[in-house]
Image: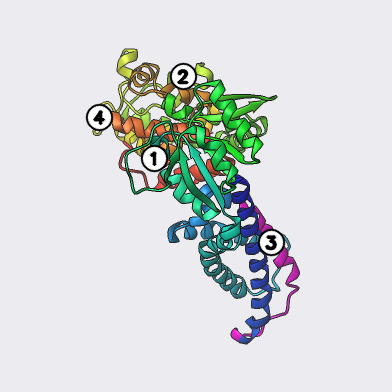
Amino acid sequence: MITNRLRGLVNLHAGVTILLAALLMLGYHNVFPYIYFAEISEPNILPFIVCVVGGMVVSIHYLHVVGPRFYRLSWLDSAWLTTRQTIVVALAVFAFMFALKNREISRVFVVTYLALLWVLLLFVNLGLPRFLCRLFFERDRRIPTLFIGSPEGMGDLKHWLAAKEMLGLYPVGFLADQEPPVSGSAPSFLGALTSLPRILAEGRVVQVIVLELPRQTIEARFIIETCQDYGCRLLIYSNLAERLRHPLVTVTEEGHQFHTLQEEPLEDPLNRVLKRSFDLALSLPVVMFLLPPLMALVWVMQRFQAPGRLFFVQERTGHAQRSFKIIKFRSMYEMDQSAEQEAQQAKRDDGRIYPFGRLLRSTSLDEFPQFINVLIGEMSLVGPRPHPVNLDRQFSDLMKGYRTRFFVKPGITGLAQCNGLRGEITDPQLLEHRIKLDLAYITEWSFWLDVLITVKTARHLVFPPKSAY
């Protein structure tokens, strides 16, 4: 029920903000001639209102991104959401103007409208959800809730309860096998589980939440049948994640419920097609037009500074733990080295790196041949960076869940790299942070996340992070 209330709140908020954005453009269009005294034409404003509405509809995605905290946003959260909504609207309007070569509407009008829209949405995103909560979920629409379980279980849900009170969740007390120590914290202790029929018969409770999975079937049946007899809504909180000490994702397959350790958006064939299309759209022109002149430049510099092979080819582990040969421009002097020596991480001021090789590494130009790996399907443009095979073994011993990275194709860049975590791994905490970002990418993948990571990485080509050496 709480989920339905939140979903409805998001839909109401989206509808109101779309309407306000459209009305703002219509009203501002009517008063703009009195503010801006230069001679301007009177364009048909309806297509631009349609663009604004379309942009606001697309930006509903960002309401779901803020998720459960949507109705209690901070000023910073509201600014984050508002900025993205305004950018989407701006893209829709400018795309329409560019596509139809529309020169009738004033650019000053469009820019000032977008500024006004940002201010309007900032306050609406901050205040409207709270107003809707008070309007729909206070007084008669509250949900008096009884909890069944231990005081420790109540403590685990303390912050969740405080957050859901705005949606009308009202705790009236809890039942437990043993009376807890005297505490001033709500809700109050109302007795043992056997008191459940009496309390429900009083009619003060419309919802029961069981704080942990019942240990015995007879206890579970007693709770379920009592709630059904008195017409009381029942929710059972699964504490399986706490028992296993790992977050779980619930999956329902043909009526059977399973728990898994993480979401995998890239198991969706459509998502895989989108990702592969993005890879091909960027890797093909790079391989055809950028890589050949870059190869010639690197070859010439190598002839002067470090004669030898043009490419450095090394075995790495890819998707589903299948091996492949990664291709890079050679940035070190040609020398006889064992596989272990070749896999040693490059250090700052590493004597193995020739002068032009330092430039290649700092600007990531040494990685450009990997667009060939992307083109043939061994790698993706964005994904967890592949490490040498012997480092995979070391890191998997140090970091639990390390091999989860192989659920997707490795990438030329990744969420960790675009956030400055690249180059030498000097301590376990740095490794842990990098792997957590890799796993977050796997579970939170979206097409727009790939685009964002690519743009941030492109910026690093011009302004390399300090870890690039």
Of badges 2 and 1, the one in the foreground is 1
Query: Where is mark 1, residue-wise?
Result: 155
Question: Which element type, helix, strand or loop, lies under badge 2?
Answer: strand
Residue type pointed to by label 3: Val
Distance from Cα at disc 3 to Cα at disc 4: 56 Å
Which quarter of the figure is the N terminus placed in?
top right
| Dot placed on the residue nearer the N-terminal end, 1 or 4 | 1
Q: Which mark is residue 350?
A: 4
For residue 64: magenta? no
| Dot placed on the residue nearer the N-terminal end, 1 or 3 | 3
Q: Is residue 308 above or below residue 117?
A: above
Q: Is residue 375 visible?
A: no
Query: Where is mark 2, residue-wise?
Result: 317
Q: Is residue 63 visible?
A: yes
Of badges 1 and 3, the one in the foreground is 1
- Residue with the most extreme top position: 338
